[in-house]
Amino acid sequence: MTNKTLSMSAAGVEDEVMPVRGRVVKSKGMRDLLTFLMVVGPGLIVMVADNDAGAVSTYSQAGAQYGTHLLWIVLLLLPVCYFIQEMVVRLGIATGKGHAAMIYQRFGKWWGLFSLVDLQLVNFLTLVTEFAAINLALSKMGVDPRYGVPLSAAGLILLVLTGSYRRWERIVVFLCLLDFAWFAIAFRLGPPIGQIVKHALVPSMPAGGMTPDLMFLVIAIVGTTIAPWQLFFQQSCIADKRLRFADVKWARLDTFLGACITITAAVCMMIAGAASHAHGFRFTDPAQMAADIGTFAGPVMRNLILLMMINAAVLGTTAISLSSAWAYGEVRGWPHSLQLPWREARGFYSLYLLCVAAAAGIVLIPRAPLQLIILGVQVLAGVILPSAIVFLQLLLNDKELLGEYANKPWNNWVNWTIIVVLFILSLILAAQVTAPNLFPSAVGGPTT
């Protein structure tokens, strides 16, 4: 592969490769590294941003209520995360278009509208949870949310008004890397490593068995680990970055590494919740959990968890708002790229601004049930997810569209299995809502 071929394969940005050293890069290893560094971003961001405020709340609540018993469920979601988003990689590179535009193009206006309304509804409610977490965290840090939440919203708006996709991406990737702080938190608070390995690798049920609360939380875990907005965000992100087929293997690696980081961070969040559980604290929300942990682990640990909550919410807000703005802009035919300045993409940026501002305003309503909103949205995402994946699966079997990059038979077996399992979980949730006594109540509390 020549250096010129390398530069053109990596998102068509040859001017960013050759001037780096002022000479041709001859080493294959160095060429591969440079290519990966230019391709990396969409997969890492979509995965790590999925560990948003709702994820922090859901995983920590799972740990606070059931200790480390549910770690195996999170681990099972690693291949699911990767396989679903890997399909998005191929589709985005093959079409150069976002997911919403492809649904409209291939399935017609009615189904396109159905998917778009679903996305906008879940996204907006999810945005409310992001600012709810910022509200909770700031309150515990002694910052008045009436000032802190609007300032956070203003910062999130400024983050995208740069007229440069790469500038936005570099800032967000830096925020993603801050997620490694969860490893330090888990190391400081975690139970014996043997217990973690056992509960991660050997499926087990908490004391009391399958209860309505447990089923609700399991569906919330699935909903927060694989969310509908991820499909729309990563495909639009790939289209905006203008990746090509030569970048597929690096985009897959980007997605796989992102999946590994996000699942490992999720395990760390559950371990933090388990530490609160082990000390006998009752979970109300992750901010209060951080305060409880501070009583035995010190104020530094408390503040670190609160700051990680805010970081998670910031990542989630920018990614989710952009997935909404990209999807709506694609459907309306608006200019919709972070490469464009405000004056050339007013509709796209205005929708982003409106989503952020409205969600921030809702959480400032006095006595809003923030934790209930946070968990409920994750369950709603879990219910809507199967239909979103069905569209993706059908698109990936379109050989006219993808050619050699269409799904192989084994892809279809894996993906339809995932879809069936998600549908079953959705049906269980619907049955639980309509028949609350479907599952017996817990006899005793969970144990570690």
Image (spheres, rainbow, N blue to C red):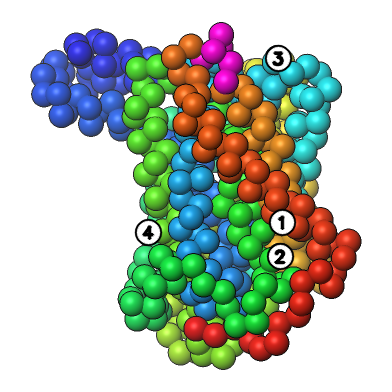
- Within-10-Å neighbours for mark 4: few <14, some 14–19, many 20+: some
State the residue position of label 3.
105
Report the label total: 4
Report the span colored magenta.
397-402
Of label 4 and label 3, which has the lower sequence position? 3
Residue that carries the numbered disc 4 in the rendered image: 180
Circle 1 packing at 10 Å, graded few (<14), some (14-19), many (20+), is many
Under mark 2, the amino acid is: Phe
Q: Earlier in the sequence, mark 3 or mark 2?
A: 3
State whether the magenta stretch is mostly helix, strand or loop. Answer: helix
Residue 143 visible at all: no
Of tags 3 and 2, the one toward the viewer is 2
Answer few, some or many: residues within 10 Å of disc 3's Cα (few below 14, many 20 plus, some between 14 and 19): few
x then y, percent, for residue 35: 28, 26
Of the numbered discs 1 and 3, the one sitting upstream in the chain is 3
In the rendered image, residue 218 lying in the magenta stretch gets the answer no
Q: Of the residues shown, which amino acid type is indicated by label 1?
A: Val
Contact, mark 1 vs mark 3 (Cβ under 8 Å): no
